[in-house]
Image (cartoon, grey):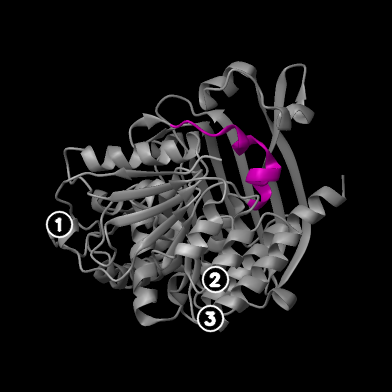
Amino acid sequence: MIKNYLPVLAVATSLVFMQSCNSTKTANESTGSLSLMVVDPGHFHAALVQKSMYEAIDPHVHVYAPAGPDVQAYLDKINQYNSREENPTSWEEKVYTSDDFFEKMLKDKPGNVVVLAGNNQKKTSYIKQSVDAGLNVLADKPMAIDAQGFALLREAFASAEKNNVLLYDIMTERYEITNALQRELAQLPEVFGELQKGTLEEPAVVKESIHHIFKYVSGAPLVRPSWFFDVKQQGEGIVDVTTHLVDLIQWASFPETPLDYRKDVQILSARRSPTKMTPSQFKLVTQADEYPSYLAQNVKDSTLSVYANGEINYTLKGIHARVIVKWNFRAPEGTGDTHYSIMRGSKANLVIRQGKEQNFKPVVYIEPINPGADYEKTLQQQVAQIESKYPGVELKKNDKGWQLVIPDRYEVGHEAHFGQVAEKYMEYLKDGKLPAWEVPNMITKYFTTTQALEKATTVE
């Protein structure tokens, strides 16, 4: 058994990430009362939480993980952030690598916030044990990848309440400006009307994401661990990225409304399908020369099949909804991950498109059911209210209705959203509680995804 403490030091001045904060206090001057413990960081999202510094967080971070390439990849990214020229961070990482890393963390408790972003096979158990030990947890999605994990997650939320700690997942897509504006517009009855009920064939709300296995993160090609392609460790696509989509549907359709999964959700249909990968593609993205033995059952004629794609059709409080996630290997040049969304209202449809016509950048459209001079006047007045919250947002007319013109300063990028989530979580920790709707809606979200997986695998 290898036991090792590796100090990773850097000296640099840092800036707090959020646009609303202009502090230039150095990390070593921080008086933050929060201290991070990063556990088994096997996903690059763990590092993205630390892409910026925070006044409320101690710059000394304790890392507990098994020795290997996963923790090294995390440390490499932290060193990259510490050594960059523009707004370098100054995290100081104290790393413990051993087979007993998790037990050691629970025994030492050098911090009060556990950050989990990695292999999902044991994540729900790590969550439960951490909150049982009186530790706050900020976890990457998904927090549960099957029905058994969902049952344990429910217990974890009960334990968190009992121990007065906060368990929260990292929902970055709420901070994407087009998603936020679509939600704002849906809360304007004069513009949107009422959310329609929809049908199975034409749902009232649709969210579709297309992702890519090979991509760049923080300017460098992303190396994914081999286990990322084992659905028993990563989870199937229908319980992974769909977490964001289900969350957005709940968040935009029933804002700040506590949901009850036992009566508000009905899974109508669900299906799954594999993404195919060649040995050369697998090597490109993992740097591994061959498939590991745990993937052998998913290999046929040297081609790896990964159940990364999924579709869920369901009702939420009687509203028909559909989520679709697709994974391709690599995006065409000049493109990237894309998102499509529609919310159907009695007065207008609110649509997000991100295709060639939009230069592969998400754009919000308002497409009225009955356009006319009166509607246009009302729309102008109502969007003025949004403009007071998001200065610079404007309307641009087109042949179907209007497009929202969004200033570039709001398009901060996916990586920056992790800092925004962390800032929001710190606000909740300061208040000592989450909003009343957050916990029941997290439970509802993971019920939806895990029950969809059960349905998709049962019908095969």
Q: Secondary structure at mark 2?
A: helix
Magenta-drawn stretch, dominant element (helix, strand or loop): helix
- Of residues 241 and 335, which is closer to you in this image? 241
Up/down of 360 relative to 132, above or below:
above
Q: Does the magenta-highlighted stretch encompass residue 229?
A: yes
Residue drawn at x 56%, y 40% as measured from the top left? 1
Q: Amino acid at mark 2?
A: Val
- Of residues 176 and 44, which is closer to you in this image? 44
Q: Position of residue 95 (x, y in %)?
A: 39, 47
Q: Amino acid at mark 1?
A: Thr
Q: Which mark is residue 219?
A: none
Residue drawn at x 49%, y 41% as measured from the top left? 338
Q: CA distance from mark 2 to mark 1?
A: 31 Å
Q: In this figure, which residue is indicated by the disc labeled 3?
A: 163
Q: Which sits earlier in the primary sequence, circle 3 or circle 2? A: 2
Tell me, yes or no, whether the two marked residues, 3 and 2, touch with CB atoms within 8 Å: yes
Where on the picture, by quarter, is residue 253?
bottom right
Label total for image: 3
Q: Secondary structure at mark 3?
A: loop
Q: CA distance from mark 1 to mark 3?
A: 33 Å
Q: In this figure, which residue is indicated by the disc labeled 1?
A: 26
Q: Position of residue 120 (x, y in %)?
A: 61, 50
- Of residues 43 and 342, which is closer to you in this image? 43
Q: Which mark is residue 131?
A: 2
What residue range appears in magenta?
222-239
Where on the picture, by quarter, is residue 423?
bottom left
Q: Which sits earlier in the primary sequence, circle 1 or circle 3? A: 1
Q: Residues within 10 Å of mark 2 (few under 14, many from 20)?
A: many
Tell me, yes or no, whether the two marked residues, 2 and 1, touch with CB atoms within 8 Å: no
Up/down of 20 relative to 437, above or below:
above
